[in-house]
Every structure is written in structure tokens, then in C-alpha cells.
């Protein structure tokens, strides 16, 4: 078996959380809602370059604290300066972390569920 990349990740939430999660991923990452099959629970598939990367799935409430073993999700970014400007203009707080000894620069933020989101740029 060989893995070639991330296909998507799914965030489960209650239905009331869907609008805020959708808005965050659209504003912060520039993802766009797209086609989604008819499924048992409401939700959204959010796309970048024709690929559904984030699946929002209203299957019920998050357990207290909303914590799992998942630490963060990392996306590959393009145009560090434009991304900084976009996040700042949207009022989305982020931190930066150049990777010592590597030609990478990372931005970190949290989505409305508290999940840590990383965007890594080649520099």
C-alpha cells in the first residue's frame, strides 16, 4: 500500500455549528462549498482546486472539551504575504513559526471547534 497525499478530513459537529465552521474555512483558507452527495446528516464539502479537502458533518454534538488525539491539520499554502493579509483582514488571529534550518514558514490558527490549523509555505 502506498499513500500519495491527504484526500480530505472530516469534522463532526452539531448542526448549529455548521454555519460558523463553513464561514471560517471559507474566510481563513479560501475554500469553497461544492457538490456533496445526499447523506444522512447535513453538512458541507469545502473545495480547493477542485478537490474536496474539508468535510463538515453535523452528526451530533462534540464530546465535552471537543478533544481527540488529533493535534492539528496542515495545509500547503501559496503566497505567504497574501495569506497574512487575508487572515488579518478577516480578523483571524494567527501565529507564525519559521522552521529552523528548513525553507518552510508556518502559520497557525484555530477553527471555531478549537482545532489547530497549520498552513505551511515554501520560502
Image (cartoon, rainbow, N blue to C red):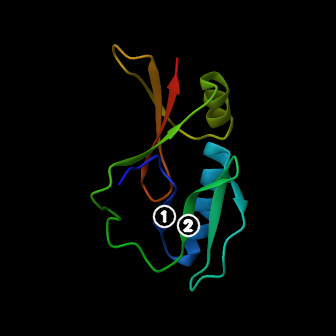
Q: Residues within 10 Å of mark 1 (few under 14, many from 20)?
A: few
Question: In the rendered image, which residue does mark 1 sit on?
Answer: 10
Residue 100, x across and y down, in percent: 34, 16
Up/down of 15 relative to 53, above or below: below
Q: In this view, which residue lies farthest toward the left?
A: 69
Give left or right: position of 5 versus 46.
left
Residue 61, x across and y down, in percent: 43, 77
Q: Which mark is residue 56?
A: 2
Q: Could you tell me which residue is drawn at 63 percent across and 31 percent down?
A: 83
Of the 4 image quadrants, the one containing the N terminus is bottom left
Could you tell which of marks 2 and 1 lies nearer the N-terminus?
1
* Element type at mark 2: strand
In the foreground, 3 or 66: 3
Q: Could you tell me which residue is drawn at 27 percent across and 58 percent down?
A: 69
Give left or right: position of 123 versus 36.
left
Q: Is the C-beta separation of discs 2 and 1 under 8 Å?
A: yes
Up/down of 89 relative to 51, above or below: above
Amino acid at each position: 500500500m502506498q499513500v500519495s497525499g491527504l484526500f480530505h478530513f472530516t469534522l463532526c459537529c452539531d448542526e448549529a455549528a455548521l454555519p460558523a465552521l463553513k464561514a471560517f474555512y471559507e474566510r481563513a483558507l479560501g475554500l469553497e462549498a461544492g457538490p456533496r452527495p445526499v447523506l444522512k446528516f447535513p453538512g458541507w464539502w469545502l473545495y480547493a482546486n477542485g478537490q474536496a479537502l474539508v468535510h463538515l458533518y453535523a452528526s451530533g454534538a462534540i464530546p465535552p472539551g471537543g478533544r481527540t488525539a488529533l493535534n492539528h491539520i496542515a495545509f500547503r499554502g501559496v503566497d505567504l504575504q497574501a495569506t497574512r493579509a487575508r487572515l488579518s483582514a478577516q480578523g483571524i488571529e494567527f501565529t507564525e513559526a519559521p522552521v529552523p534550518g528548513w525553507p518552510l514558514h508556518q502559520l497557525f490558527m484555530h477553527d471555531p471547534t478549537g482545532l489547530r490549523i497549520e498552513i505551511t509555505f515554501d520560502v
